[in-house]
Amino acid sequence: MLHTFTKAGCASAVAALLMTVATASAPAAEVTTKTVVDRLQIQDLITRYYNNFGRENAENFADFYAEGAELILGERHFKGKDGILEAYGRGPAKEGQPPRPPRPARYSFIVTISNPLIVVDGNSASAELVFTEFEIEKQGDAPKVIVQGKEYARFTKVKGIWRYAVRQIKSGTEPPLGWKP
């Protein structure tokens, strides 16, 4: 079940963030209590999404997306909730397609996120961040970095709750063509 922030629960976080933003040296978009709460809600959505990876009983990835949303993994595009489930090997089986092989056995798989830049504009928003995947094959092994890349995302507010509209995963340093935060 997806959770949402309450205004009361965000009060101290909002105050701390406002103080941080007020002392930043680079100019930023207008900061209001509403945009700070929206940013926190979006960051919570992103964090819970990434915490799903490697979990036995993960939340349904498609529930993080708005209807008609798109997930872009490199050059592959997955549209709608069924497409997103397919991207994670949890969608309905396609006729004539062999079943997906089982995931490799491993002790731990963790994905961390960093450097989130979230820009809110009314009921839409964008975010870009860095993600790093770590794997530990067996207990006692050192973690290995599997991959590092960037996420570029657009969000929409649906019935007061933020959802992914477009989520694009890309390697390298260049943003997607036409990307503007």
Image: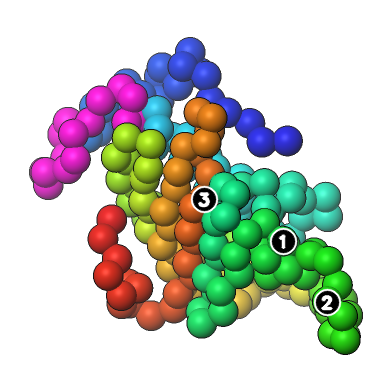
Q: Residue at horizontal 67%, vertical 66%?
A: 83
Q: Which residue is mark 1?
A: 82
User: Which residue is drawn at the image coordinates 61% and 69% (left, top)?
Assistant: 78
For marks 2 and 1, give the CA distance.
11 Å
| Label 3 element class | strand
Q: Earlier in the sequence, mark 3 or mark 2?
A: 2
Label 2 Cα crowd, 10 Å radius (few <14 / some 14-19 / many 20+): few
The span from disc 1 to disc 3 (Cα, nearest Å) is 15 Å
Instruction: Give percent across and percent down for residue 181.
Output: 28, 56
- Does residue 46 lie above or below 137 as drawn? above
Name the residue tied to disc 2: 94
Q: Which residues are magenta?
A: 22-36
Reading the image, the residue beneath label 3 is 164
For this rendering, which residue is in front, 114 or 158? Answer: 158
Disc 1 residue type (three-letter): Asp
Q: Seen in the image, is 102 located left or right of residue 28? A: right
Q: Are marks 2 and 1 in contact (CB under 8 Å)?
A: no
From this view, report whether residue 113 is shown above or below residue 171.
above
